[in-house]
Amino acid sequence: MSDNVWLVAGLGNPGPGYAGNRHNVGQMVLAELAARIGAKFGKHKTNSTVAEGFLRPGGPKLILAKPNSFMNNSGGPVSQLLNFYSLEPSRLIVVHDELDIPFDTLRLKSGGGPGGHNGIRDIISAAGTPDFIRVRVGVGRPPGRMDAADFVLRDFSAAERQALPNLLVDAADAVEKIADDGLTAAQQHFHSIN
């Protein structure tokens, strides 16, 4: 069964004070996916909030997970979820913010280093491998001399909030395409339009 099951982890920080931050865009994408599959998030014993459902009858099962830890400590909950559901890291899709990609752009990849993203670094460490899929949601670079850590902990600007719903839809579409058709097909589709 695990060949048609995907663990989709949306990274962010817990609590309402962080909900609109750029750093929480991964969790925003999971909210879009949960609405599509008609699933509600509930507490899970792996220090995560989880929603489960199928893309369609007979289609791939998605286990949507928001770690309840802070971003930099995402690895423990994600590793626990992989163990709980008996999934290999190759069945993991991590949705996260990416500073090195312009806002409103997606990039999909598998493997590689953390690229300065501490949440990804912690997942690589806890999972023991970098070989999982990432949906990298571009949030752009901080303006002027603003510190990157300060930038990602700020809410999206008013102009960005206008485009944000479409970006969340695109990122959710990318997760669905990966689950349905594989990473290569998803890259060919989304990298050509972004």
Image: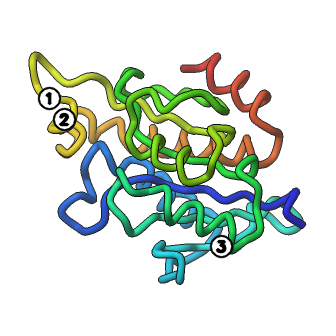
Q: Quadrant of residue 108?
A: top right
Residue 147, numbered circle = 1
Q: Quadrant of residue 189?
A: top right
Identified by mark 2, the residue type is: Phe
Q: Quadrant of the N terminus?
A: bottom right
Q: CA distance from mark 1 to mark 2?
A: 6 Å
Q: Residue at x 25, y 53 (%)?
A: 20
Dot 2 or dot 3: first in sequence order is: 3
Residue matched to label 3: 52
In the rendered image, residue 36, in percent from the top left (x then y), is placed at 61, 62
Judge whether 118 appears above or below 188 on screen.
Answer: below
Q: Residue at x 46, y 35 (%)?
A: 137
Circles 2 and 3: CB distance less than 8 Å? no
Q: Residue at x 20, y 45 (%)?
A: 153
Identified by mark 1, the residue type is: Asp
Q: Quadrant of the C terminus?
A: top right
In the rendered image, residue 110, in percent from the top left (x then y), is placed at 67, 33
Dot 1 or dot 3: first in sequence order is: 3
Chosen colour scheme: rainbow
In the rendered image, residue 160, in percent from the top left (x then y), is placed at 27, 34
Circles 1 and 3: CB distance less than 8 Å? no
Q: Nearer the viewer, mark 1 or mark 2?
A: 1
In the rendered image, residue 101, in percent from the top left (x then y), is placed at 41, 22
Identified by mark 3, the residue type is: Glu
Circles 1 and 2: CB distance less than 8 Å? yes
Q: Nearer the viewer, residue 52 or 86?
A: 86
Residue matched to label 2: 151
Q: Residues within 10 Å of mark 2 (few under 14, many from 20)?
A: some
Q: Nearer the viewer, mark 2 or mark 3?
A: 2
Q: Quick one: which residue is furthest to the left in this view? A: 145
Q: Nearer the viewer, mark 1 or mark 3?
A: 1
Left or right position of 7 against 3: left
